[in-house]
Image: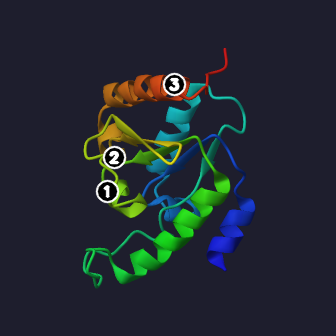
Amino acid sequence: PAWQALFARTRPAPVLWTYPELGLDLSGQGSKARSACLRELIGKLRLPRGASAFWPLCLAPPHPDAAKDDSGQGTEQASEARFFHAGLRLLEPRVLVLVGPESVPLADPALPLRTPFTQHIVRGTLFVLLPDFSALLENPALADKACVFLRSAFNGVGIAAQN
């Protein structure tokens, strides 16, 4: 039910943003600094209204001591991954922005993204990896670099900034 309610509030957009703590941030229990960083980053990109949407990898970040299955994923995490992927299929973004390397195994353990500022196309969706929020918050120059990287990636799939 929580995933259904979240999906009902989420509109398809060409750019979908995600990270492990997004579920907390969307529920109002997350970090104000992280949310402000994301708002500032998106603002600097000057994307058209409605170009961005947010879809969590999980509703609560995985606990490091949680039980793991054979793939190395937590059993609760694997269950939530179904909902993430179902939403991804229904929302059909052109770009999925993953914030932080810890997002990659949650989104798709087979993604070959390991370091920030890399990208890979899977089934017509461009996956891009940014540094985690702690690095972006500590280093404003890194956040500026993320904007340059994202503008280039977005232009490559026909998503341009507004003047």
Q: Quadrant of residue 43?
A: top right
Q: CA distance from mark 3 to mark 2?
A: 23 Å
Quickly name the residue at label 3. 156
Pinpoint residue 67: horizontal percent, then vertical percent.
Answer: 28, 85
Q: Are marks 1 and 2 in contact (CB under 8 Å)?
A: yes
Quickly name the residue at label 1. 102
Tell us which disc is closer to us: 3 or 2. Answer: 3
Residue 19 visible (yes or no): yes
Q: Quadrant of residue 62?
A: bottom left
Query: Along the polypeptide, which appears first: circle 1 or circle 3?
Result: 1
Amino acid carrying label 1: it is Glu
Residue 29 visible (yes or no): no
Disc 3, SS: helix
Amino acid carrying label 2: it is Asp
Query: Along the polypeptide, which appears first: circle 1 or circle 2?
Result: 1
Pinpoint residue 153: horizontal percent, then vertical percent.
Answer: 47, 28
The chosen color scheme is: rainbow
Amino acid carrying label 3: it is Gly
Is residue 117 rendered to the left or right of residue 51?
A: left
Query: Along the polypeptide, which appears first: circle 3 or circle 2?
Result: 2
For the N terminus, the quadrant is: bottom right
* Disc 2: CA contacts within 10 A as few (<14), some (14-19) or many (>=20): some
In the figure, 104 relative to 118: above or below? below
In the picture as drawn, the residue positioned furthest to the front comes out as: 123
What residue is rendered at 49% in x and 24% in y? 151
Give residue 132's mark.
Answer: 2
Q: CA distance from mark 1 to mark 2?
A: 8 Å
Disc 1, SS: loop
Is residue 141 rendered to the left or right of residue 128?
A: left
The residue closer to the viewer here, 3 or 38, is 3
